[in-house]
Image (tube, grey):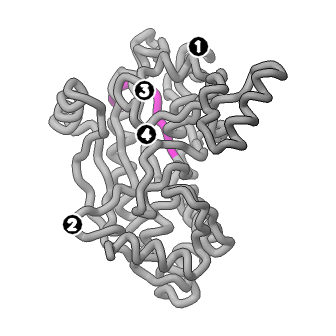
Amino acid sequence: MCSHHSFLDGLMSHGLLIDTGIDGLYGRSGAFEDVISRFDELISGFGGGDNAEVVRFPPGMNRALFEKSGYMKSFPQLAGTVHSFDGDDKQHARLLEKIDAGGDWAGDQSATDIVLAPAACYPLYPAVAKRGALPPEGRIYDLNSYCFRHEPSKDPARMQMFRMREYVRIGSPEQVIDFRKVWLERGRELIGRLGVPFDVDVANDPFFGRAGRMMASSQRDQGLKFELLIPIESVEKPTACLSFNYHQDHFGLLWGIQTNTGDVAHTACVGFGMERVALALFKHHGFDTRAWPKAVRAALWG
């Protein structure tokens, strides 16, 4: 049996995750949610001094803005859309007939104006652009949202619906680069308190297709994305639990975000995979949080 199968079985047998019949879609127990909440508080302790503006978006976002973002060019395999029935009584009757016969009724629905957010920060950039030019000090945002990526897997660390906590920096290149440098050090210190093995390495996103492979190579060569990796499924293939991304002027150009001097703003973000960090803790410290090392419990529960 694969290691992630046995770990997933353990999580379920201890009631930490609840099977829904869909790979990567799980219910969470109170004990699991408590770890998420405590880790969330730990993150806030590290980022609280930055006076970030707290923003909370729902897990769905504007379809037109999603299309403009270019996500479908790079990651069509991960995207999720929201569909709904908008037919008349006759069409409804045909839909019910298909359901009763065990047929495919999805074609009787149409795409709505909502898509599932692939990352917590995607709805932020067009909203920031509407506010006009940035102040001289730029802006920092604190985000937290459920996200969706269509990649079903038996690996519990590769959920289809998961929570992402992010800090996003928007400003001059110097401000943004300094932000990422600071968070690279904070990330190491933060995870170091949790008593799990980790490493930080340059990485790239899973861009789609031949052109995507070239983009991924460029991203890696420029060191635009770093990941903090923790062994969950295996030591050979550790899981990215934190990411540190420098987007350069990509979102600034796309959405027309300007600095106070009229230059195109640069952006960077640090993202925390909330479930992944919780899973790393259960993997390395056991399924009973009461038996975790004292230092780890002190870091999370005080």
Toward the bottom, the furthest residue is: 291
Q: Nearer the viewer, residue 177 or 85?
A: 85
- What's the mark number on residue 222? none
- Quarter of the image with the C terminus is bottom right
Q: What secondary structure is the stretch in magenta mostly built from?
A: strand
Dot 2: within a 10 Å radius of its alpha carbon, few (fewer than 14), some, or many (20 or more) residues?
A: few
Q: Amino acid at mark 3?
A: Tyr
Identified at 35% across, 61% down, the residue is: 188
Which one is earlier in the sequence, the residue at label 1 or at label 4? 1
Closer to viewer: mark 3 or mark 4: 3
Q: Which residues are magenta?
A: 166-174
Identified at 57% across, 60% down, the residue is: 21
Which percent across, then down, holds residue 217?
Answer: 17, 34
Which one is earlier in the sequence, the residue at label 1 or at label 3? 3
Q: Is residue 175 among what the camera can see?
A: no
Magenta-drawn stretch contains 102: no
Give the Cα separation between the discs numbered 3 and 4. Answer: 17 Å
Q: Nearer the viewer, residue 111 or 161?
A: 111
Which percent across, then down, holds residue 273?
Answer: 47, 54
Residue on which the image places disc 1:
132
Residue on which the image places disc 3:
71
Closer to viewer: mark 2 or mark 4: 2
Closer to viewer: mark 1 or mark 3: 3
Residue on which the image places disc 2:
236
- Quarter of the image with the N terminus is bottom left
